[in-house]
Each structure stands twice: as C-alpha cells, then as structure tokens.
Image (tube, helix red, strand yellow):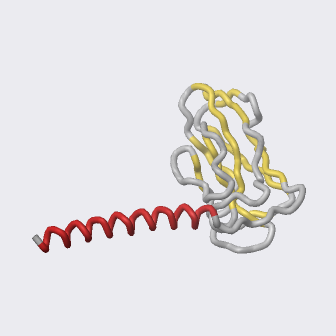
C-alpha cells in the first residue's frame, strides 16, 4: 500500500514539474529580448514582382536597405538575416521564426534562393530576423506578394 501512494505522489510531482516547465517556457518566450531596427529599414523583393506569372523553379532575390545582412548567431548592430514565408501569415514578432516548409531560414546570410512551387497562386513575404531568428523591433518585413506558378 505504501508503494502505491508513493507512485501516486511521484506521478503528481512529475505532472506538476511538467506544468511548471510549460509555464516557464511560455514566460521565457514572451520575455525574449528584441533587437531594435533602425528607422527607415526596408525589406523587399527584387524578383519576382507582385502579380508575376513564373515557371517553377523560380529564383527569389531579396533586397534590404538601411540595414546589413549577417549570419544567424552574429551580434552586429543593424544587421539580420532573411526568412522567406511561403503561403503563410507572418509569424509572431516576439518569438523566433519557425523553421518548416512555410518558413524558410537563410541563416548563412543568403540573399536569394531558387524554389520549386506547385502550379497555382502563392504568397511570399520576407521577414528579417536577428541573431536568434526573432523579428526586429519594429519588425522589418516586406509587403506580401502573390505570384502564379505555371
């Protein structure tokens, strides 16, 4: 009987620890320091243009003014690295940009990419991230463009 109570206490203790970890993670994520962006910084697409019809694969070139490009992990003032958002809304500005098929990271400082797109309409948007992949404050984002892959 004593072992059974101890097992229940252990399970309850583990559940409580898990809940505290989740709460701690939520607090830690909301308190991620943001890197300031300079006034007038602008992120944009060089190619393709909004409304363009393209053949896949398509080369996407990123433009940036008022800031510089640096790889992820590099802490240099007024710099960041690109993230391409494909067919998704912009990510939350107070957390690192996710890494998945819709959120492509360019942490080595790349300024262009050739991507395969299925036939049809697609939206593209650029978001600049700091050394930790967190959007700057205020965020430096391009306009969202729509292209059609043929």
Relative to 39, 98 lies left or right: left
Q: How many marks?
A: 0
Residue in the picture at 69% in, 68% down: 33
Q: For the view shown, which residue lies furthest in the right direction?
A: 40
Q: Could you say where residue 120 lies in the image, as x and y percent from the top left?
A: 59, 25
Q: Could you say where residue 109 lies in the image, as x and y percent from the top left?
A: 67, 62
Report the front residue among 63 and 59: 63
Report the front residue among 26 and 108: 26
Report the front residue among 145 and 53: 145
Which of the 4 image quadrants contains residue 71?
bottom right
Residue in the picture at 61% in, 55% down: 97
Residue in the picture at 70% in, 31% down: 146
Which of the 4 image quadrants contains residue 82?
bottom right
Q: Could you say where residue 116 lies in the image, as x and y percent from the top left?
A: 55, 39
Residue in the picture at 77% in, 41% down: 143
* 122 vs 4: above or below: above
* 10 vs 119: above or below: below
Report the front residue among 102 and 111: 102
Q: Could you say where residue 41 lies in the image, as x and y percent from the top left?
A: 85, 56
Q: For the view shown, which residue lies furthest in the left direction?
A: 1
Relative to 49, 132 lies left or right: left
Quadrant that contains the C terminus: top right
Quadrant that contains the N terminus: bottom left
Which of the 4 image quadrants contains residue 47?
top right
């Amino acid at each position: 009987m004593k072992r059974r109570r101890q097992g229940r206490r252990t399970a309850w203790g583990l559940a409580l620890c898990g809940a505290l970890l989740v709460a701690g993670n939520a607090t830690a994520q909301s308190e991620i320091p943001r890197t300031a962006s300079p006034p007038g910084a602008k992120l944009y697409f060089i190619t393709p243009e909004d409304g363009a019809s393209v053949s896949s694969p398509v080369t996407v070139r990123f433009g940036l003014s008022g800031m510089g490009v640096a790889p992820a992990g590099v802490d240099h003032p007024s710099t960041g690295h690109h993230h391409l958002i494909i067919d998704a809304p912009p990510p939350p500005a107070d957390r690192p940009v996710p890494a998945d098929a819709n959120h492509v990271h360019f942490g080595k400082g790349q300024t262009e990419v050739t991507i395969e797109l299925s036939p049809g309409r697609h939206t593209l948007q650029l978001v600049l991230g700091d050394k930790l992949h967190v959007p700057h404050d205020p965020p430096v984002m391009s306009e969202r463009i729509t292209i059609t892959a043929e």
